[in-house]
Image (cartoon, helix red, strand yellow):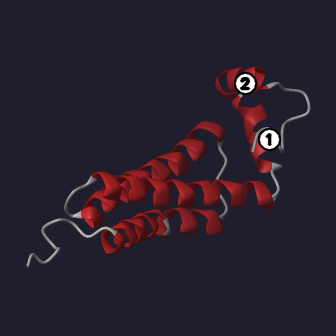
């Protein structure tokens, strides 16, 4: 998002410094972001939950959905922490639709990835032996 909707007067390095030194400047930039930029963030959350759940389920030899669900739970906690930190550090609240999406999507999407893997690659114990 930074490279597409970049603040006119800041480079990437300066923006990183401004996040710590001048939170109001960052807050003003965040508040001016268009809805497309926020949709990209939500898409990133969903994609991260799906790919994380997928990888966890692929690595797990058993209980693939449980392992994928753990990833979804961690991402859900990280999302809640993000909401909290953005409000307390930059005094910027996410739009309501973004909060709802952030709370409802990570866990089911990661579980979906785990279910897809468990259907496509059943564990060795689930395969019937002749």
Q: Residue furthest front?
A: 130
x, y percent for residue 20: 64, 24
x, y percent for residue 93: 64, 53
Above or below — where is 78 with respect to 14? Answer: below
Q: Nearer the viewer, residue 129 or 87?
A: 129
Which residue is under mark 2?
Answer: 18
Tell me the residue at 34%/60% (across/down): 68
x, y percent for residue 114: 36, 66
Tell me the residue at 41%/71% (across/down): 112
Q: Which mark is residue 113?
A: none
* Quadrant position of residue 116: bottom left
Q: Nearer the viewer, residue 11 or 89?
A: 11
Above or below — where is 5 with respect to 77? Answer: above
Tell me the residue at 84%/44% (across/down): 5
Q: Secondary structure at mark 2?
A: helix
* Quadrant position of residue 115: bottom left
| Left or right: where 98 falls relative to 102 | right
* Lower sequence index among marks 1 and 2: 2
x, y percent for residue 66: 26, 63
Tell me the residue at 33%/62% (across/down): 69
Which residue is under mark 1?
Answer: 28
């Amino acid at each position: 998002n930074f490279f597409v909707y970049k603040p006119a007067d800041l480079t990437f390095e300066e923006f990183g410094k401004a996040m710590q030194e001048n939170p109001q400047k960052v807050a003003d930039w965040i508040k001016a972001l268009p809805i497309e930029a926020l949709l990209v963030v939500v898409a990133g959350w969903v994609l991260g939950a799906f790919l994380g759940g997928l990888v966890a389920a692929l690595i797990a030899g058993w209980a693939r959905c449980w392992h994928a669900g753990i990833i979804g739970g961690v991402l859900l906690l990280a999302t809640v922490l993000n909401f909290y930190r953005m409000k307390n550090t930059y005094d910027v609240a996410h739009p309501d639709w973004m909060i709802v999406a952030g709370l409802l999507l990570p866990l089911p999407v990661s579980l979906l990835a785990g279910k897809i893997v468990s259907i496509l690659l059943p564990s060795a114990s689930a395969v019937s032996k002749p």
